[in-house]
Amino acid sequence: MKTTLAAASKPDEPALVTSLFARRLAQPIAVAAVRCGVPANAVTVAGGLCWVLSLALPPLLLSEGAMPEDRVLAIWLAAAFLWCAGYVLDVADGSVARMTGTSSRAGFFLDYVFHLLFKPAFLFSVGLGLAGRWLDCACGGGEGTVGWMQEGCVAVLLSALLLALLSIPANGAADTCAAERVLCDEVARGHLKMEGASAPGLWLGSDEVTAPAARKRGSFVRTAKTLAAEIASYYLQGPFFALLVAADCLLARTTPLRCFPVTTAGFLLLSVALVLRIPLRYRREARRLGRATGRGRAGRTLSRTACLLRVALVFAPFAMPAVSSVSGPRKCLALAAVWLAAAFLERAAEAATRRAGSPIHNRHLALAAESAWMPAGAAAAIGWLSADAGVAHLGFMLAPLLAVAIVAAESGAAAHVFCQDVGKGRLREDSPADERRALTARRAFEPARGVGLAKWLFPLALAADAALARTSFHGAATLAFAALAVLSLVPRVRRTMRAMA
């Protein structure tokens, strides 16, 4: 068994930061795991838990009342440590698998599940923490904090909350996951072939981020551009924000600045950039699919209307406090009605699409909206409802976890593994085993299971809370739904891992 860095490295490593730094940092951990007999999947779970646990820490800063400064800094530093630890362990698990010869599709799937769980909710969690910090600055600054200073704090607070929600679809690459899920479904139904000259381009796309790191090294300017792209894509986000948090903690200790200006600036810049990229990324995937599969129009209007309703659900909670003439129960029912209207439109669009021969573009749009905006809408609703019920502290902690629970991570990861295998020529059209794997990939995101139930169960939870609005159990139904959705992650992932193995 070889435990050298060369044996641990990935031949086609796409991330420059991993190739230059992270693989070397992770090597001692990987060697120790090999010598202690720790399997690669255990390292994957350890790193993934670091990421998932970190999501609940920054929202603690939205608790009622002022929090001691030492505790605030401790929460941020603990989150920063978990971001970096999760990233290093995420690199180490692959090293362990390669050094022990235990690489597998199931392990790749598990690793990518944690990527898809962490990515959408990461900036959301950071934004909630920054909102709490600025709210504390606005309300606890004393008599001297008046006028434009206090108004500026509130403006940054609202901007952070809104961008935190918008970062869920922006940071989750939902368009790419949706394209891969549709492609898996098309193969399982016999509409697309796995082999052919267009297969690699169709299944892997042409995103420069996936190119091997060896091609990206060059001049200082080229390397800097690549690292900046990796911050925007995912690889460097955790370590990058850990550095920003460390700088702000140092400023808080040495200067009167308490509002985390460096982290706030980084969050605002990155979130705005990612939000502006949402339509561009969807357009890129749509064009790529169109070149290989042709275009269709059936159900397009219904799909677009449903998508707009999903987007409206993200902004609706911000308008709720302004509608003072409408009671709390009616607001819950209004949210539930819009949520159900979007779900019914999505089902109608799917039916129209099927009747027209399954145009792939409309199904891609519907899945992208479901994967991107549905989690954001649910997080916005639970945040507003928990604040209205007087349990904002618990609701804001659960909101990032609810977002990841209904983001269809196991579905997107299964499709990604399958697409990687097809694009790299590891699957054959004439192989019965590969045909069964195609069906397995499709079953992994069957709409009747898992996340598909959320579009129907969540509005029922909202309706139940409307009935409980005048009792001491107001908000209990939605919080219970969030907790059950989070707990459902483990059996969902285990089921798909067994199917892929």
Image: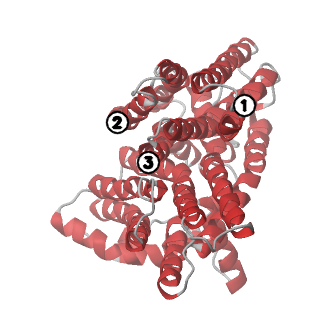
> Is residue 304 found left or right of 419 in the rendered image?
right
Q: Quadrant of residue 232?
A: bottom right
Element assignment for label 1? helix
The residue sitting at 72% across, 52% down in the picture is 275
Q: Please state, as top left, top right, bottom left or bottom right, where the C terminus lies in the image.
A: top left
**Residue 481, position in %: x, y?**
42, 29
**Residue 432, position in %: x, y?**
44, 27
Other residues around mark 2 within 10 Å, as few (<14) / some (14–19) / many (≥20): some
Other residues around mark 1 within 10 Å, as few (<14) / some (14–19) / many (≥20): many
Colour pattern of the rendering: secondary structure
Other residues around mark 3 within 10 Å, as few (<14) / some (14–19) / many (≥20): some
Q: Nearer the viewer, residue 453 or 499?
A: 453
Tag 3 residue:
393
Q: Amino acid at mark 3?
A: His
> Is residue 149 found left or right of 472 in the rendered image?
right
Between the C-alphas of marks 3 and 1, the distance is 30 Å
Please tell me the numbered disc located at residue 487. 2
Q: Quadrant of residue 318?
A: top right
Q: Please state, as top left, top right, bottom left or bottom right, where the N terminus lies in the image.
A: bottom left
The residue sitting at 36% across, 72% down in the picture is 26
Between the C-alphas of marks 2 and 1, the distance is 27 Å
Decide if residue 230 is in sight here: no
**Residue 37, position in %: x, y?**
17, 61
Please tell me the numbered disc located at residue 307. 1
Q: Which numbered mark, 3 or 1, is in the foreground of this view?
A: 3
Furthest-left residue in this view: 36
**Residue 103, position in %: x, y?**
35, 53
